[in-house]
Image (tube, grey):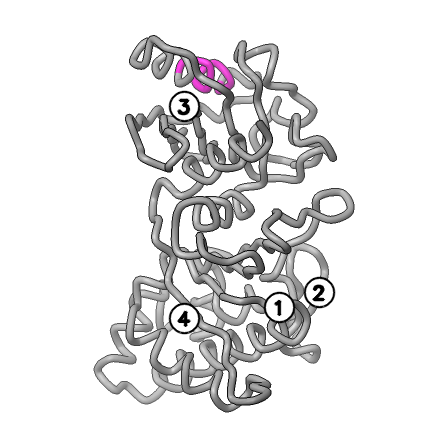
Amino acid sequence: MVFIGIDLGGTNIKGVLVNETGEVLKQHYIPTRDDPEGHWRGNVLDMVRYFKSFWQGPIEAVGLSAPGLPDETNQYIAFLPNRLPGLENFVWEGYLGLPAFVINDAHSALMAEASFGAAKAYKNVVLLTLGTGVGGGLLINGELFQGLSQMAGHLGHITVNAHDDECSIVGLPGSLEYAIGNYSIERRSRGRYTSTWELVEAYRTGEAFATYLWLASVKALAVGLCSMVNTFSPECIVLAGGITLADDALFTPLQTFMEVYEWQPGGKSTPIVQAYFGDMAGAIGAAGYAMKKR
């Protein structure tokens, strides 16, 4: 069986054609036209036609990864204000001519790892995407947990400092997203750094302020992860996103902080692993979700 996975981003539409083992048979990119008339939807249709022309055989379904909150049946995005006009309430199945299932983009990253990647061997998983912001997803008993109104998994919006004046987009003060997300680095560093990459490079040289700021961010991440361990007791935590490219600068101090703060009954700790998939994770995860729905 063959499935199409599409990741709808603000810059590019990324697509993959995969089989049931997760092998990528073909991938494709099309620029996103984010215009007020919703003409970008034609780009998604062009992507599907491209894969149909390439494969020239039966395609089971399309999975679509997109920002926003899907409806309860994952047929369309029900809530996404002020972005990609025409996406809200648009049902894809009839338009694309194939069964189509829509999934939140952070959830899609989890499905990529759970279906084919670093979390394939586990049934209970927490995933965080560390990038401009912090997203997340929960796998419980082998199933994506979406919750009421498909809101579950906004793990970047847990509070790690209730006294902070900075509120996240969902209204909570001192969010994990603010503590480590790339979007806040200039404010957190008082203008000294414009990206997490600059901060990490300064940390590697031993610069004192960078060391303080980076380790404070990693400590906040560790405390947040320990809270998730206490809440969900996952078999594995997967970290994805551009900040994980810091490699040992992230994972070594993170492990140290986890050893300090994680509850480890009987000495059993929760493994933290780096995501297997990179740039195409959203599209691959969307295909994996479509497989489960079929």
Is residue 41 in the magenta section?
A: yes
Crowd around label 2: few <14 · some 14–19 · many ≥20 (10 Å): some
1 or 4: mark nearer the eye: 1
Query: Which residue is rendered at x = 54% and y = 55% of the image?
Result: 135
Residue type, label 4 = Gly
Crowd band around label 3 with a 10 angstrom C-alpha radius: few (<14), some (14–19), many (20+): many
Q: Magenta span covers which residues?
A: 40-46
- The answer to the question of whether label 1 and label 4 lie on touching residues, with beta carbons closer than 8 A, is no
| The disc label shown at residue 175, or none | 1
Label drawn at residue 191: 4
Pointer 3 or 1: first along the chain = 3
Residue under the image location 68 percent in, 47 percent down: 146
Alpha-carbon span between mark 1 and mark 4: 20 Å
Q: Nearer the viewer, mark 4 or mark 2?
A: 2
Q: In the image, residue 13 lies at what x, y percent?
A: 41, 29
Up/down of 120 relative to 28, above or below: below
As measured in the structure, the alpha-carbon distance from the residue carrying label 4 to the one carrying label 2 is 24 Å
Query: Residue 233 is drawn in which quadrant?
Result: bottom right
Query: In this image, 135 relative to 197: left or right?
Result: right
SS assignment at label 1: loop
Which tag, 4 or 2, sits closer to the chain's start? 2
Kindly report the distance in space between the C-alpha atoms of the residues bearing marks 3 and 4: 49 Å
Q: Kindly check if marks 1 and 2 are in contact, taking CB atoms under 8 A apart as contact.
A: yes
Q: Residue furthest left?
A: 205
